[in-house]
Image: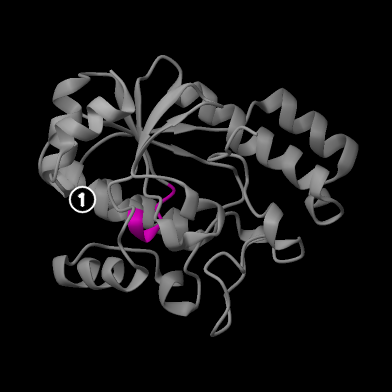
Amino acid sequence: MSVKEIKEIIGDKKGVEMLQVIASLYPSEVVFSTSFGIEDQIITEWIGKNNIGIEIFTLDTGRLFKETYSLWSRTLERYQLNIKTYTPNTILLEDFISKKGPNSFYESVENRKECCRIRKIEPLQRAIKGKKIWITGIRSEQSVNRHDMDFVEYDEVNDIIKIHPLFDWTFDQVKMYCKEQYIPYNVLHDKGFPSIGCQPCTRAVQEGEDFRAGRWWWEDQSKKECGLHAVKS
């Protein structure tokens, strides 16, 4: 089924209804990736509270904030569901750290991208292997690169169709929805962290800064993607 056909079937359906339609179209072939960001918590709520047949997975890079791990535990307790966990390949990670040290990502973009490849991209490829649809919490306002995306799109790099149910939501809408629905979210979001990744690579943003200014802040703005949502050039 093409992106156009999926869009036509979804029509004006939003939220829970959209996810239910996708799950029925592709039984056992839909996955949702959560990093326990505030957007992901909304989608987890929709899946968990409505027993939608979508597998949830996460990537444990080994360098997450303690607040993220705490929220992970709260999420499991709240929804009583399985969140399949993928970790870095031990051999690749040990070799990388042995050669370049634990914090080489500060030294060059190349090192940082290699770290992301080992800790995120390779595990992601295992997580989505054999699946047809990948649900994400991406929103268009999160970065310049993401403005060019659409709420349903074909990911040529990973050969999978991606659907972003919250694509046109603002950060304020996301926070308000979580508060209204009492959805647990990472406390760091209330401390200046609109985007939360690995602890060494994430800082709070200042007023007026871009949403992702706190990610890999030592790098050029145009390079600030880890590769999970890369666009083939």
- Residue at x 13%, y 34% (from the top left corner): 20
Quick check: 135 left or right of 142?
Answer: left
Whether residue 199 is situated above or below residue 97 in the rendered picture:
below
Q: Which amino acid does label 1 sit on?
A: Glu
Q: Which is nearer the eye, 76 or 178?
A: 178
Q: Mark 1 points at which residue?
A: 45
Provide the secondary structure element on which disc 1 rests. helix
- Residue 146 in the magenta stretch? The answer is no
Residue 3 appears anywhere in the view: yes
- Residue 38 in the magenta stretch? The answer is yes
Quick check: 65 left or right of 178?
Answer: right
- Residue at x 75%, y 61% (from the top left corner): 220
For residue 176, which quarter of the picture?
A: bottom left
Whether residue 43 is situated above or below residue 70 in the rendered picture:
above
Quick check: 27 left or right of 70?
Answer: left
Q: Which is nearer the eye, 49 or 94?
A: 49
